[in-house]
Image (spheres, helix red, strand yellow):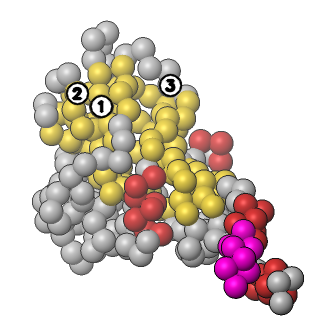
């Protein structure tokens, strides 16, 4: 009996090693491969009741130490990644087309903050004051870290006067996608300036309404769930009857 058990365990180990484990890379970009799950806009403290959801561009500014304009982005994962998949990595990519008011010594640190589960913002309704036509942010600009967004960005990038424009820039957002695949409500990110050198520095990005080559996209690398092969397992057991 002991020998039989040892053989069965060894057989199971062989199966585990032979099971397919190739990672899958999924790129979610509006209009590509029939994907239509991207929502994006920007919100502006100087126009606190204006929605900018239909524009091809999005602005990010910081005035003194406070955000003045911030981006909202969300990619629906529904039907895109199988339930039970293991998320290896996720990367948010946004096209930068201009730097605004950057002198030779200017810099901006920017990062995506996961929007909290109850803030179901609507692209065509979100403003600096409200996340949809009915409800208000707890602090305008999605700035409450207890109610509107989480207090720590998934990652961050630095932008300088010498930073090339007309290029994609990328943020690691693995933690957010892992949380959503584990069951948290996906309300996307607030991509905002975290800090800067002072003054009034800005970054301008392309929205999903721009040409396909410049639209934001999300890249997810995951291991799909591997179903147990009952027939093969039964065959191993049959060898030792």
Q: Could you tell me how far apart the alpha carbons at marks 1 and 2 are, in whole angstroms? A: 6 Å
The secondary structure that dominates the magenta segment is helix
SS for tag 3? loop
CB of mark 1 within 8 Å of CB of mark 2?
Answer: yes
Where residue 109 is drawn, which disc sits there?
A: 1
Q: Position of residue 161 (x, y in %)?
A: 37, 16
Q: Left or right of 58: which side holds 222? A: right
57 drawn magenta: no
Where residue 165 is drawn, which disc sits there?
A: 3
Please tell me in which quadrant of the rendered image residue 2 appears. bottom right
Please tell me in which quadrant of the rendered image residue 228 appears. bottom right
Pointer 2 residue: 196
- Indicate whether 28 appears above or below 12: above
Q: Where is residue 223 in the image (x, y as percent from the top left)?
A: 63, 61
Q: In which quarter of the image is the N terminus?
A: bottom right
Nearer the observer, 152 or 38: 152
Report the span colored magenta. 1-10
- Indicate whether 162 appears above or below 156: above
Q: Could you tell me how far apart the alpha carbons at marks 1 and 3 are, in whole angstroms? A: 16 Å
Give the crowd class for mark 3: few <14, some 14-19, many >=20 residues within 10 Å. Answer: some
- Indicate whether 14 appears above or below 238: above
Nearer the observer, 239 or 126: 239
**Number of labelled discs?**
3
Nearer the observer, 130 or 192: 192
Q: Left or right of 203: which side holds 143? A: left
Q: Could you tell me how far apart the alpha carbons at marks 2 and 3 are, in whole angstroms? A: 18 Å
């Amino acid at each position: 009996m002991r020998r039989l058990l040892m053989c069965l365990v060894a057989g199971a180990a062989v199966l585990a090693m032979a099971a397919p484990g190739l990672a899958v890379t999924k790129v979610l970009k509006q209009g590509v491969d029939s994907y239509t799950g991207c929502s994006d806009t920007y919100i502006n403290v100087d126009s606190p009741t204006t929605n900018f959801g239909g524009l091809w561009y999005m602005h990010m500014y910081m005035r003194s130490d406070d955000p003045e304009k911030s981006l909202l982005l969300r990619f629906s994962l529904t039907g895109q990644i199988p339930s039970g998949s293991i998320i290896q990595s996720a990367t948010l990519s946004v096209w930068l087309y201009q730097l605004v008011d950057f002198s030779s010594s200017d810099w901006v640190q920017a990062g995506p903050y996961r929007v909290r589960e109850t803030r179901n913002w609507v692209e065509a309704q979100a403003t600096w004051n409200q996340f949809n036509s009915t409800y208000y942010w707890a602090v305008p600009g999605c700035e409450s870290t207890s109610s509107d967004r989480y207090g720590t960005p998934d990652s961050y990038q630095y932008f300088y006067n010498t930073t090339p424009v007309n290029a994609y820039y990328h943020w690691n957002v693995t933690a957010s996608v892992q949380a959503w695949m584990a069951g948290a409500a996906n309300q996307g990110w607030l991509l905002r300036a975290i800090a800067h050198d002072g003054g009034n520095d800005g970054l301008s990005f392309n929205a999903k309404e721009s040409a396909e080559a410049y639209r934001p996209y999300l890249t997810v690398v995951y291991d799909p769930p591997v179903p147990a092969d009952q027939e093969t397992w039964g065959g191993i057991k049959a060898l030792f009857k």
